[in-house]
Amino acid sequence: MATLRETIQVDGIRCERCVMRLAKTLEGHDGLEFANATLMGDVTLVYDDAQTSRAALVDRMARGGFRERPAF
């Protein structure tokens, strides 16, 4: 079991209500230990990589209307 921490930048966060909606989208996801979003679109995730993956978390956020920003 390895706990990973990373920050992902997403589009779709424009207000505090969006932050709350993102939290609701991720709530209850197996293996997710911590999630925090800022109004700048930075989402910090701490998760157990034996139970979930970055791809699964990004997919879950996308289903909630939050798309990962492409890396430059």
Image: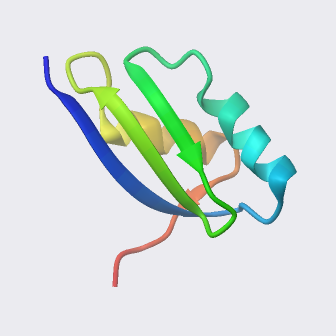
- Pick whichever, 1 or 54, lies toward us: 1
* For residue 44, above or below residue 56: below
Q: Quadrant of residue 40?
A: bottom right
* For residue 9, above or below residue 36: below
* Snapshot colouring: rainbow
Residue at 86% across, 48% down? 17
Is residue 47 shown left or right of residue 50?
right
Considering the image in quadrants, where does the N terminus appear?
Answer: top left
Q: Position of residue 67 (x, y in %)?
A: 57, 59
Is residue 5 shown left or right of residue 57?
left
Residue at 29% across, 42% down? 5
Considering the image in quadrants, where does the C terminus appear?
Answer: bottom left
Residue at 83% across, 60% down? 15
* For residue 68, above or below residue 70: above
* For residue 65, above or below residue 59: below
Residue at 33% across, 29% down? 47
Residue ranking furthest to the left: 1
